[in-house]
Image (tube, coloured by chain):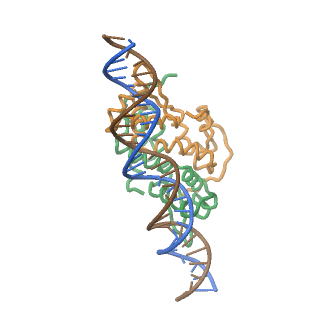
Chain colours: A green, B orange, C blue, D brown
DNA sequence: CTCGTGCTTCGACATACTTCTATCTTCACA
DNA sequence: TGTGAAGATAGAAGTATGTCGAAGCACGAG
């Protein structure tokens, strides 16, 4: 996972509040691109919803009609994006999600309470108002 | 935009609550894939945060060092994904975001309050519990 | 009607992505 | 130490994607 990713994401304003910088857009788009594949989304969901919060690769491979290397490739994409982490225990490798990253993404997608923005520590802090969109009925 | 997309998205459980079906993953991945490009993410953010909640293509084109056709292509991708809508007024075409879709995506990413899930009408309803992940400290 | 502007569509090209088979690494166990 | 299983890596093939220039469409102004 890229160093400092979570901290960086926690500082992002919601998409709709102010325009993303090129750098912010680059970081975020890498995460969304990683989720932009149905197999990877299902892998993410399977891992996240699995009992114990983790799943071994063998659990995941049997769900799909795909070869082992293909599943391994998709897991690598998710891992390098910072969405999951893997740990080897004996013969098996177990993956679990990085919940803060998903939460940060959710915070970027939806505007927080008025005049607040997540600060990466789980709560919200005041923020100066930019151009607020006027959405008609 | 695909018909019934918003209603469908509103019925999705959070990623971490239960495994996505192949069909659900297909729908969602199309949205994430559309956001998986830095230019498109910035376009989305520029449109959403623009004064009046809408932006014309000329406003957007001048921000990037890209040709008009390229911007138009990215806007088409966002439009066909259901993330934005476009409307022609006189010479100009104005785009605005589809806020319900972004909100639905955010709801998929983050677990709602315990035993609840968005019903697509802006509030939450009870839901049966699946395998709840145990996240260690 | 004609012209210019804003935007989209078309066709082409280079790059990236998804998937596979074959091979390699790591580990448990005899 | 040797063997087998779980995963990862490497390389290749087919497809999709991002970008451009050229051309087309819609609209307002003369």
Q: Residue furthest right?
A: B128
Q: Is residue A29 visible?
A: yes
Tell me: residue A69, above or below residue B85.
below
Q: Residue at x 50, y 35 (%)?
A: B83
Tell me: residue A39, above or below residue A109.
below
Instruction: From the viewer's perspective, tell me whether residue A59 is left or right of residue A83.
Output: right
Instruction: From the viewer's perspective, tell me whether residue B28 is left or right of residue D21.
Output: right
Residue A128's x, y, as percent? 36, 33
B104 or A72: nearer the viewer? A72
Tell me: residue D12, above or below residue B28.
below
Q: Residue at x 63, y 39 (%)?
A: B11
Residue D3's x, y, as percent? 60, 83
Residue A15's x, y, as percent? 43, 37
Number of numbered discs: 0
Residue B54's x, y, as percent? 43, 27
Tell me: residue A87, above or below residue B47.
below
C4 or D5: nearer the viewer? C4
B59 or A48: nearer the viewer? B59
In which quadrant of the rendered view does residue B113 lie?
top right
Q: Residue at x 42, y 18 (%)?
A: B90
Instruction: From the viewer's perspective, tell me whether residue A136 is left or right of residue C6.
Output: right
In which quadrant of the rendered view does residue A91 lie?
bottom right
Q: Is residue B44 visible?
A: no
Q: Quadrant of the N terminus of chain B?
A: top right
């Amino acid at each position: 996972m890229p160093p400092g990713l979570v901290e960086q994401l926690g500082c992002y304003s919601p998409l709709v509040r102010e325009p993303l910088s090129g750098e912010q857009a680059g970081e975020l788009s890498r995460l969304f691109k990683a989720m932009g594949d149905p197999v990877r989304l299902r892998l993410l969901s399977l891992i996240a919803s699995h009992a114990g919060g983790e799943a071994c690769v063998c659990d995941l491979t049997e769900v799909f009609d795909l070869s082992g290397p293909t599943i391994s490739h998709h897991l690598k994409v998710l891992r390098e994006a910072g969405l999951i982490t893997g740990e080897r225990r004996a013969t098996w490798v177990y993956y679990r999600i990085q919940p803060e990253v998903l939460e940060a993404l959710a915070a970027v997608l939806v505007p927080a309470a008025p005049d607040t923005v997540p600060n990466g520590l789980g709560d919200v802090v005041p923020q100066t108002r930019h151009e607020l969109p006027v959405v008609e009925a």
